[in-house]
Image: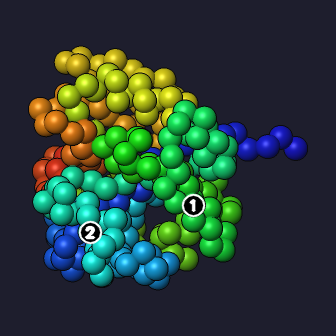
Amino acid sequence: MSSPSPFLRLRQICLVAADLAAEAARVKSLLGLEECHRDPNVGKYGLENVLFPVGSSFIEIVSPTRPGTAAGRFLERHGGRYGYMVIMDCDDPARRQRRAESLGVRIANVIRHGDYFGVQLHPKDTGAAMIEFNSTAGGGNPMGPYSPAGPDWQRAIRSSVAQRLLAVEIECLDAAALAAKWGAILERPVQNLDGGSYRIALDTGTINFLPGAGPEAVFAGVELAAAAPATANVCGVRFRLSATAS
């Protein structure tokens, strides 16, 4: 029997909030999504969290519960703006870890619990956001197990407003250079778009690199497929809802 084909999917984004309850309420009211899980494993990092499924992908919000956390420092540095993590599930996080290390990218954290294995890359080496590669046993099917979202995440799927995670948007002064760096880490080609923008296509979802005026590369936006076009802001990140066929 042949082995499953390798895959790399935009599976989850992570945002940071000073007030978890307030931002979770915004996700429910503006995006029409329902909470599926709160992960007790993040407590050891001084965090609490909540996840919302968008189709078979996820929006996560984390909030510090004590001083001195990496997420808390991110909040202080950016004043409550921008996204924190771009999370992809794949067939082999260990191989992707070795690839990152071969490029001189440091590993910020390795997470193993139960059937879950995650590798987080240092954001100072990736630029704009922390990159995570993860896998869950039996998770090749996007509607199958995904450990961070809990055992019954499929029950919380709602599609009256937001329906699918299409893209994350990175803004930076040199979009070409940052796109090339991420392309090398992800082992995916970079597409040159009009107006100085670039795109990396994954098996599900894309990462778009846009020209930005600020001195620092930032995870500034998210595009969602939706029932009707709209815009929203959650945790200082712009959400663009595009009326795309589901």
- Contact check, label 2 and label 1, Cβ < 8 Å: no
Residue 77 as seen in the image, left or right of residue 48: left
User: Dot 2 surroundings within 10 Å: few (below 14), some, or many (20 or more)?
Assistant: many
Q: Residue at x 35, y 60 (%)?
A: 14
Q: Residue at x 29, y 19 (%)?
A: 193
Query: Which residue is denoted by mark 1 in the rendering?
Result: 110
Q: How many badges with numbers are in the image?
A: 2
Please state which amino acid type lies under the numbered disc 1.
Val
Instruction: Point out which mark residue 72 bears.
Output: 2
Location of residue 138 in the rendering, given as x and y in whole percent from the top left corner: 68, 61
Q: In which quadrant of the rendered image does the N terminus lie?
A: top right
In which quadrant of the rendered view does residue 236 lie?
bottom left
Q: Nearer the viewer, residue 227 or 146?
A: 146
Element at badge 1?
A: strand
Please state which amino acid type lies under the numbered disc 2.
Gly
Work out which residue is located at the far right of the displayed protein and give it: 1
Q: Nearer the viewer, residue 132 or 103?
A: 103
Residue 111 as seen in the image, left or right of residue 156: right
Residue 246 seen anywhere in this rendered image of the structure: no
Residue 5 seen anywhere in this rendered image of the structure: yes
For marks 2 and 1 on the same chain, the one whose residue lies earlier in the sequence: 2
In which quadrant of the rendered view does residue 143 lie?
bottom right
Location of residue 150 in the rendering, given as x and y in whole percent from the top left corner: 51, 75
